[in-house]
Image (spheres, grey):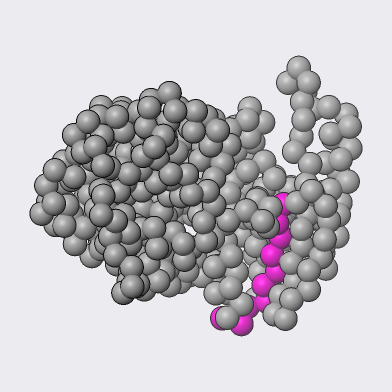
Amino acid sequence: MQLLLFCSSPRSVSGGMEKVFSQLCKRLCQRSYDVHSMYRAERFKKVEGAHTTSWDLPLEHLRTWNKLPRPGSIFSFMKDLRRLSRIIGQIQPDIVNCHFASFYVSYFCLLKPLHGYRLVISTHGRDLAGGMSAMQRAVRPYLLRTADHVTAVSADLETQIKQEAGGRTRATTIPNGVDIEFWSAEEKSKGKETNPTIINVGALRGVKGQDILLRAFPKILSAHPSTQLWFAGDGETRQDLEALASRLGVSDHVTFHGWCSTEKVRDLLQAATLFVMPSRSEGFGIALVEAMAAGLPVVASNVGGVPDIVESGTSGILVPPDNAETLAEGILKILQDEEYGEELATIARERAQDFRLNDALDEYERVLRKVTSE
């Protein structure tokens, strides 16, 4: 079976969706499929590997003026469409699996009748969020209806997909999986921080709500003055967050670790006291499962796919999004009751077992095989 997998992000990006994409490519190669991968890029590049061929591919995102596509942008779009069509003609894939339902997937929708492949779109949450461009929102129902099958990382997302497609698409929920053994492995030489330590892992973006965590932090410090707050990740809002920490007078207790390797993130999780995910929107929350597997109690916003992972009061604490007061209360509930925190952590570690990476990859493979046999 010839498989073509497309990632809407550049090859250098390493977020949750991109991790799923690379892990799936690796798994399918191991299962002896003929796998070809494509990444959106600024410049064209073909990469020959031992077991697969990969492309970095420039794709024009139609630019508009007064709601109409610009002529120059249309020309670039058609040029990129022709180049992609030539590559697909060389591969002759049985199935194309596009990750992230972005505008760039429209290329594969348009070429589907010409090349006769089956199309599976894998959504990851942010691609169906309301903050996307007007062009993205306009083409999304077309993408979802054109696909032979759509996968979603949460039941909430699957419901949204069916609504946007007007019930004219098949959809399956495949929760993201993590390497439980890696995240639960303990470094015997390392121990917990002496001071209570809160950690947030993820890209620094407005949708991730790190500003809400900072606004909750003064109340936490007033009750526990030695508490530390760690951010593991980097992104567009870092300077704003650093400035906010300074204005709130908490900079001495806040550490921005920047981008971290997975090994470094694991070390930080194992040293921390609890994990907090204050997202305004979250398709799934891979970092949340990783923290649970590492044995941390968690406090998270009750949004998107998060309730599929955490049962509030049992395997963690869920709070409303965009509310610093209730977020602080949830965190203090754990900091002020060590036994309760340990109980949450134990159940969280057990719950994380339901999100094993191999199970998720097996489910993706099952969907791909099912679609090709229909």
Q: Is residue 219 above or below residue 57?
A: above
The front one of 291 and 114 is 291
The number of callouts visible is 0
Q: Which residues are magenta?
A: 31-40
Coordinates of residue 93 in the picture (x, y in percent): 71, 67
Q: Residue at x 76, y 34 (%)?
A: 62
Q: Residue at x 51, y 45 (%)?
A: 203
Which secondary structure class fits the magenta region best? strand
Coordinates of residue 352 in the picture (x, y in percent): 30, 62
Q: Which quadrant does the N terminus fall into?
A: bottom right
On the question of residue 136 being in view, the answer is yes
Q: Is residue 68 above or below residue 139?
A: above
Coordinates of residue 41 in the picture (x, y in percent): 75, 51
Q: Is residue 86 left or right of residue 288?
A: right
Q: Is residue 72 left or right of residue 147?
A: right
Q: Residue at x 88, y 46 (%)?
A: 79
Coordinates of residue 3 in the picture (x, y in percent): 66, 69
Queried whether the magenta region covers residue 29, the answer comes back as no
On the question of residue 130 being in view, the answer is no
Q: Is residue 37 left or right of residue 234?
A: right
Q: Which quadrant does the C terminus fall into?
A: bottom right
Q: Is residue 322 left or right of residue 341?
A: right
Q: Residue at x 54, y 45 (%)?
A: 234
Q: Is residue 164 above or below residue 215?
A: below
The front one of 361 and 187 is 187
Residue 66, by quadrant, is: top right
